[in-house]
Image (cartoon, rainbow, N blue to C red):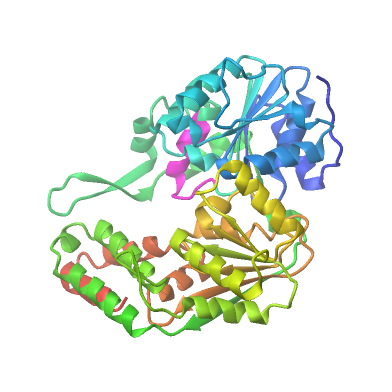
Amino acid sequence: MTWSTTTELLPHQADAVAKLLPSRVGALFAEMGTGKSRCLIELAKLRAAKIDRVVWFVPVSVKETIRTEILKHTTCGPEDVVVFDDRTDARTMPLDRPWYVVGIESLSASLRVVAAFNALVDERTFVAIDESTYIKGANSARTRRVTDMSRRARYRAVLTGTPFTQGVVDLYAQMRFLSPKILGYNSFWSFANNHLEYATDRRTGKVTGQITRSHNTDVLAARIAPYVYQIRKSECLTLPPKLFEEHWVPMSHEQRDAADAAKAEALDDEGTYDNPHIAIFRLFSRLQSIACGYANGEPIRHHRLAGLMDVIERIPDGEKVVVWTKYRQGLNEITAALRAAHGSDSCREFHGGLDERRRGREVEAWRSEARFLVSTQQSGGHGLTLTEASHSVFYASTFKYSERAQAEDRIHRIGQSQPCTYVDIAVSDSIDRRIIAAVRSKGATLAAFREEIDACKKHGLRDRLREMIRAL
């Protein structure tokens, strides 16, 4: 079919399209909220004479968002956009539609989806991977499948706002999907030998999986430059400011006892000193769970929920609020409290336990009638546009700053007219201190602690590690 766009490009979007259009492959590294979906739609329109369809891979949680974007910016109707679901099958799927939206995670687990994608791909297909860090694992089944099958496609693109969540190691698979000629390496090991340095185990001398340094990054930058366009919000948009607050609550006696017990177990475990990075990840996870009111999976007394309700009381009546949490248990506790205080229709949920249709309905119901949207960062942190709200409350944040930044920018993007206020609920004298400090410095909580561990290896690791654990 013939279709056209219905909205104008912003100047920065037009510049991105002009840079990427001449090449059959390209990467758009655009910060969240700058409208990278609109850029991809424009590229598809300008290539319409040479393609029959676009296969658009996105995180499962945002498939409905992308469908809405296509309908908003083009003359296409609902029947023109095929959104893969649990019934999509290669034998019954229509092959004559211009748009196919596929959950990228499905390529790992569903041979049915793999077969359906395989039936779509030929020389007149445009394959795009949105949030392309989902294929950063060079040897994962998902990455291999989408890369191998997409070689038949005439056009390929990757889009993301965070191309390097773990450093330049993330670059290899994304560029290889576009073309192995860009970086010039036929295997990840060739790439690693030239650009990555790995740590060695202090006892055995064997190389570990931890990357300590990157080399020759200027060479990588020069090789990818012809195929990449980068958009930063600070350079192209005048968005309202971000305002940050912290709301600290005391630690209960039960939480204190549970945290002390967790640290004591770590100190007594020889595995802590043999493999400190793994041990610290487990300890951090356990301490955060305790700070959120759960010890060994069982609820314990805490004041975090009361802190959230105090924050909500300070937000003007009627203003929509997004509440982010890390744990499903916490989500259930939050929604129950909000509904009890503000009415059963005041709150909607967004998490991995809901199927795609239900998640879409929950977001639409929040936009139209509810005040609170409670979401896990893992499910809702990518792709959603939630600019109806100007307040986000982080009930429990993740350890990775990249995930935190994704969640923050759900409300801080094109269409937002109000200053965005972010409030962290945190427990005094707990692991939350480190999490908040990492967020404010735009760093990863665990990565920062691992750097401290590595720095003290030459100066009595065991004694220093014990001091560090006691101070958590």
* Residue numbers of the magenta segment: 163-176
In the displayed structure, 186 sits above or below 300; it is: above
Residue 16 visible in the current orientation = no
Residue at screen point 39% across, 83% down: 251
Residue 98 place in picture, x, y as percent: 73, 24
Q: Is residue 3 left or right of residue 259?
A: right
Please state the horizontal and vertical placement of residue 52, each as a whole percent of the image.
72, 18
**Compared to 196, does 142 lie above or below?**
above
In the rendered image of this protein, does residue 383 appear above or below residue 105? below
Instruction: State whether the magenta stretch is mostly helix, strand or loop.
Output: helix
Q: Residue at horizontal 36%, vertical 43%?
A: 196
Image coordinates of residue 413 in percent, x first then y, are 71, 56
Depth order, front residue of 378/207: 378
Residue drawn 23% across and 77% down? 467
Q: Is residue 208 magenta?
A: no
> Residue 40, image x and y in percent?
71, 35
Query: Toward the viewer: 354 or 200?
Result: 354
* Residue 50 visible to an observer of this rendering: yes
Across the whole image, how many numbered discs are drawn on residues?
A: 0
- Tell me the quarter of the image containing the N terminus: top right
